[in-house]
Amino acid sequence: MNIGDVARRSGLPAKTIRYYEDIGLITPLRSANGYRTFRDSDLHKLAFLGRARALGFSIEDCRNLMTLYEDQSRASADVKRIASDHLEKIDAKLAELQQMRATLANLVSCCAGDNRPDCPILADLATDPEH
């Protein structure tokens, strides 16, 4: 398969596929004229990477997960540790987003939203967080 075929079948842009090759996540074959030739195993790896990235795993996590996936003697505890660490990061981000939402909802409810110039939203944004 060429890069267009594998991009279409994997759902990943060709630019992303080239990036994954550049950083060593995949290694397609090269024909005599230098064109990439993708095997079914490359397509499978790209689908794996696409799913992992869709779940928010970092490139380094994807690299580690791919290594574990290819290691038949892997310990599932290693995979679980990576996923658990990522889940903790998601939970922390959700808590941060919930706090942001609560603050913004409060500011929106305090703003009259009329023709007067005073606005608690702008006042809060202008507040120095150090004081």
Image (cartoon, rainbow, N blue to C red):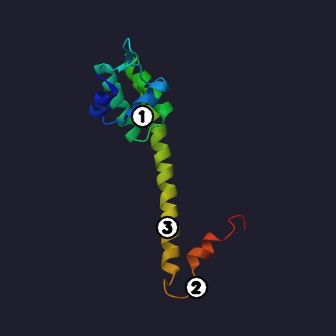
**Judging from the image, what secondary structure is the residue with disc 2 in?**
loop
27, 104: nearer the viewer: 27
Circle 3 is placed at which residue position? 102
Q: Earlier in the sequence, mark 3 or mark 2?
A: 3
130, 88: nearer the viewer: 130
* Location of residue 37 by image quarter: top left
Q: Residue furthest front?
A: 33
At a point 57% along the width and 80% down the height, the residue shown is 119
- Please state the horizontal and vertical placement of residue 41, each as a whole percent of the image: 31, 20
**Judging from the image, what secondary structure is the residue with disc 1 in?**
helix
- Please state the horizontal and vertical placement of residue 30, each as a whole percent of the image: 39, 15
Looking at the picture, which amino acid does disc 1 mark? Thr
**Judging from the image, what secondary structure is the residue with disc 3 in?**
helix
Q: Total number of numbered labels?
A: 3
Q: Earlier in the sequence, mark 2 or mark 1?
A: 1
- Please state the horizontal and vertical placement of residue 18, each as a whole percent of the image: 43, 29
Mark 3 or 2: the one toward you: 2
Q: Is residue 108 above or below residue 4?
A: below
* Location of residue 76 by image quarter: top left
Residue 38 shows in this picture? yes
Circle 1 is placed at which residue position? 16
How far, Cα to Cα, is label 3 from label 2?
A: 24 Å
For disc 2, the neighbor class at 10 Å (few under 14, some 14 to 19, many from 20) is few
**In which quadrant of the rendered image does the N terminus lie?**
top left
